[in-house]
Image (spheres, rainbow, N blue to C red):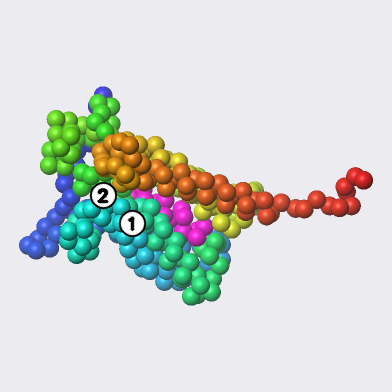
């Protein structure tokens, strides 16, 4: 039985010059849901809700700026003739890895300003980030963007001709990579919440920062294979849709983040291991 996904379009409604878009609505929902979750987890770790509430608008701003700068830097050929177009973020063009970098830098600066420890705060933000990503990815569905290669699988996605690259004008159905990543992020969220709960109950010993390292590895592992299906990757030394002879930046960065998360987790856990007792060493 086929379950074809078809987008109803990007607009929720339009009233004269005012329009409400699904993408903006979903981003707002993601931010609010993330705030609620981070606040709840923060209370369990003794972090004041006001600290998270004050960080939120700065975090969103830093993530958006980082996401846009990252995208523009890798797609500069689109903006070289008219650099002012790089400011037109409402026309699309952001990257999640840029958002993660911008968000992390914002959190570091905020913690220095408020004189708060960075890693405990980041640990309660990471599940909220995974939740926000799971919600926000559905904006790609309504915009008919960020889809994958053609497919005849039962869960295929129908893309309007206006949104298809020239190479695929004769194709109708594509991989719903937005759905793959949304579901993957739900799995990452469940994993992080399970670890958080086990640590809160004293069943496992997770040092500050460990949950953030797990997020980097878990999210990035999914992004590696999902990115391989997409036909609109950011490429180095090549052009989409296939990046032939080049590098898919999201895959490269994801592999680096997996390595970084694994090294960070090993280092954090190694620091918590008790040193051998000299009295118990055989001579």
Which stretch is magenta? 122-135
> Residue at 9% across / 63% down in the picture?
17
Residue 171 at x, y percent in the picture: 17, 30
Q: Residues within 10 Å of mark 2 (few under 14, many from 20)?
A: many
Residue 77 visible to the viewer: yes
Q: Name the residue under label 2.
A: 139
Q: Nearer the viewer, mark 2 or mark 1?
A: 1
Q: Main secondary structure of the magenta part?
A: helix
Residue 192 at x, y percent in the picture: 50, 49
> Element at badge 2?
helix
Q: Which numbered disc covers residue 38?
A: none
Q: Which numbered disc covers residue 70?
A: 1
> Element at badge 1?
helix
Query: Image quadrant for the C terminus?
Result: top right
State whether residue 267 is above or below residue 180.
Answer: below
> Residue at 33% across / 40% down in the picture?
246
Q: Does the magenta stretch include residue 130?
A: yes
> Residue at 12% across / 42% down in the picture?
162
Q: Where is residue 18, by image quadrant?
A: bottom left
Q: Is residue 224 magenta?
A: no
């Amino acid at each position: 039985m086929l379950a074809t996904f078809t987008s109803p379009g990007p607009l929720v409604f339009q009233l004269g010059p005012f329009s409400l878009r699904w993408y903006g609505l979903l981003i707002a929902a993601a931010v609010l849901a993330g705030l609620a979750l981070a606040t709840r987890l923060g209370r369990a770790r003794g972090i004041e809700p006001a600290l998270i509430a004050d960080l939120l608008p700065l975090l969103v701003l830093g993530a958006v700026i980082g996401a846009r700068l990252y995208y523009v830097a890798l797609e500069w050929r689109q903006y070289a003739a008219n650099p002012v177009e790089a400011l037109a973020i409402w026309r699309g063009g952001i990257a999640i890895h840029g958002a993660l970098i911008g968000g992390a830098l914002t959190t570091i600066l905020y913690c220095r300003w408020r004189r708060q420890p960075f890693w405990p705060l980041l640990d309660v933000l990471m599940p909220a980030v995974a939740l926000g990503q799971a919600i926000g990815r559905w904006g790609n569905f309504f915009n008919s963007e960020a889809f994958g290669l053609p497919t005849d699988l039962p869960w295929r996605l129908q893309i309007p001709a206006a949104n298809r690259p020239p190479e695929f004008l004769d194709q109708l159905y594509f991989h719903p990579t937005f759905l793959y990543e949304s579901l993957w992020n739900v799995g990452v969220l469940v994993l992080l919440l399970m670890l958080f709960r086990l640590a809160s109950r004293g069943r496992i010993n997770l040092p500050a920062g460990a949950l953030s390292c797990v997020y980097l590895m878990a999210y990035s592992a999914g992004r590696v294979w999902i990115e391989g299906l997409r036909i609109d990757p950011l490429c180095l030394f090549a052009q989409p849709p296939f990046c032939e002879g080049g590098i898919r930046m999201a895959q490269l960065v994801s592999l680096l983040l997996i390595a970084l998360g694994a090294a960070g987790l090993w280092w954090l856990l190694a620091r918590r291991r008790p040193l051998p007792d000299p009295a118990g060493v055989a001579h």
